[in-house]
Image (spheres, grey):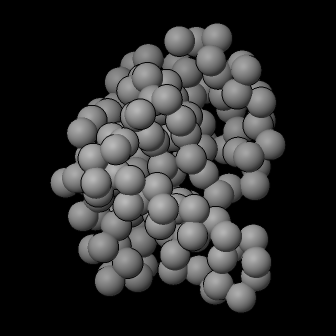
Amino acid sequence: MLLYLDNCCFNRPYDEQSHSRIYLETQAKLYVQEQILSGQHSLVWSYILQFENDQNPHIAHKHEIAKWKNLSKHWISASDDIIVNAKHYQTLGLHVKDALHCACAVKANADFFLTTDKQLQHFHFKSVTKLY
């Protein structure tokens, strides 16, 4: 399977783990990470992931997350169709960066988009899949 993890997923293990939801999301992310490392799944990396990670104020976290770029099998660069799709997703209520992540996942034809972002978890991707 081809997986797209947004920036929230990559950062989840660095969050305070005392809340059960955060802890469980971290464990799920680490499990998926193991599957990627073992070759069971492939990872998509995108220009918006790179941009967000470059802005990470935690240098050690930034460097650890950046290693995933080298492990990814697919690189999604900025393109006009990504911008068009992202603008459409914004009309459906997504924030700019979230819309760009979704548009990149669609461009990559990812099987799954993983996030820990509450807004995205409640977004109806039925609208997104119509663009495939």
**Which residue is depicted at the point 64% across and 22% down?**
128
- Residue 105 % position (x, y): 47, 32
- Residue 26 % position (x, y): 58, 70
Left or right: residue 63 versus residue 83 is left
Q: Is residue 17 above or below residue 87?
A: below
Q: Is residue 16 above or below residue 129?
A: below
Count of picture labels: 0
**Which residue is depicted at the point 48% across and 62% down?**
31
Q: Is residue 56 above or below residue 9?
A: below
**Which residue is depicted at the point 72% across and 19% down?**
127
- Residue 12 % position (x, y): 56, 70
What is the quadrant of residue 117 in the picture? Answer: bottom right
Q: Is residue 82 visible?
A: no
- Residue 33 % position (x, y): 40, 59
The answer to which of 50 and 42 lies nearer the viewer is 42
Q: Is residue 99 visible?
A: yes
What is the quadrant of residue 23 in the picture? Answer: bottom right
Outermost left residue: 70
**Which residue is depicted at the point 56% across and 28% down?**
86
Left or right: residue 17 versus residue 105 is right
Q: Is residue 15 above or below residue 87?
A: below
Image quarter in which the N terminus is found:
top left
The answer to which of 36 and 97 lies nearer the viewer is 36
